[in-house]
Image (cartoon, rainbow, N blue to C red):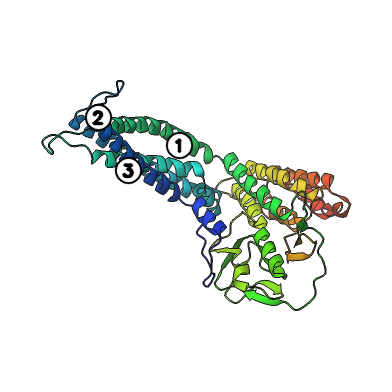
Amino acid sequence: MACRRPRGDPVTPVRTIALRVRESFWFWPTILGITAIIVAQLLVALDEALQAGGTRIAFLDVLSASGGRSILTTIGTSMLTVAGTSFSITISVLATTSSTYGPRLVRNFMADRANQLVLAAFTSTFLYAIVVLRSVHTAVEDTTAFVPVVAVHVAVLLGVVDVAVLVFFIHHIASSVQVTSLLTQVEADLIAALDVAFPEAPGHHRSTVSAVMTGDWVTIPARSAGYVQSIGWDRLRRLAEHKDVAVEVVAMPGTHVLPGETVMKVRGEADHDALIAQVTFGSARTPYQDVRFALQQLIEIGVRGLASGTNDPYTAVSALDLAAAALVPIWRGRDPITVHRDDDGHGRVYCCWTPIETLVDEILESVAIYAIDHPEVLRAALHFAERLNAAAPPHRAHVLTGRIELIAAALERATP
């Protein structure tokens, strides 16, 4: 998804650029395309040097100008055609995934490094072929004929490699549209987001026990509308420590803000532009630090499986199983970060993540609404809740009792 910098920010954070690059189809084709052009020019120069010195590589066939042109033209046109076909297949898969599993999952395909590199391989081979092709000339066109033998044979080698890439692409795109693959990708995003908010070991600079905050707070407003996509917590803590101030993040990742609404508060004298520059804004939510959005993606796949047109309750069962794999370790005793401290133990950056109880309740609420006529899903939800209950520490021992009773009653009514 495209991220945009709020007007007035002095610097675009590196992570904003990284997000743009990660979810774009243009970055790797650009890098490999430039590399292909440079390599083509270098190999043509090598051929010129070898032929000027009368050197001939024994295992490379001598080519005529027409033969070299024919090979390069065939490879170039074929690779451009294959690149267009591959792109069409990708767009078709994006459309199918969007309509079947949810439009927010398109980001997964945009960020898929394999899809980006396949497109880059085909386009870079095309660029390599046409750059080498322009160097081929006959004695009629010039005083002497010149055919870059090494460069042409490298083009043939690239063509062979691209055939293997095409086979890999077909296999990859076929496996990536399977619901199990989609669920696994979404689960990985969820686990990564949970590790940010609920770290297994808070560490020296992070604490799950907040300190008492006193003093006057100055608000830092948003300069444009958008979603808070991520926050550079370590950088923000270091800035607060350097200026000897305290910062309270009001708009956590996933929050939509309008111009003038409060993003954070600061106590003390600090450069507000430098502080808000650590916040990445965008036009859509992303799962990198937005725990609720990462969880909603998993729930959405399961809920869409319950639609009358799809009628696939086992997708919802799989979604609940994967949700349990991600949430049970958190439920067992991990608490959200509430304050980032400096080396002296002073609270520098305060935050408020969504409680794990709220996240679990949202899952069970969705099941209660959409799975009322699906006994298989109700059984999976009951199993999900019982798994959490079995792993619950004392302060969460009875949190799910009411939900478990409701699901059990719904299952009894739905069972023939």
Q: Quadrant of the C terminus?
A: top right
Point 51% across, 64% down: residue? 4
Q: Disc 1 vs disc 3: which is toward the camera?
A: 3
Q: Which residue is mark 2?
A: 53
Q: Which residue is mark 1?
A: 169
Q: Disc 2 vs disc 1: which is toward the camera?
A: 2
Q: Secondary structure at mark 1?
A: helix
Which badge, 2 or 1, comes first in the chain's sequence?
A: 2
Of 356 and 235, nearer the camera is 235
Q: Which residue is mark 3?
A: 127
One can see residue 415 in this view: no
Alpha carbon of mark 2 to alpha carbon of mark 1: how far?
43 Å
Instruction: Report the amino acid beneath label 2.
Output: Gly
Instruction: Report the amino acid beneath label 3.
Output: Leu
Q: In the rendered image, which quarter is residue 70 located in?
A: top left
Residue 157 in the image: state x and y as whole percent.
36, 30
Horizontal side, residue 17 vs residue 377: left or right: left
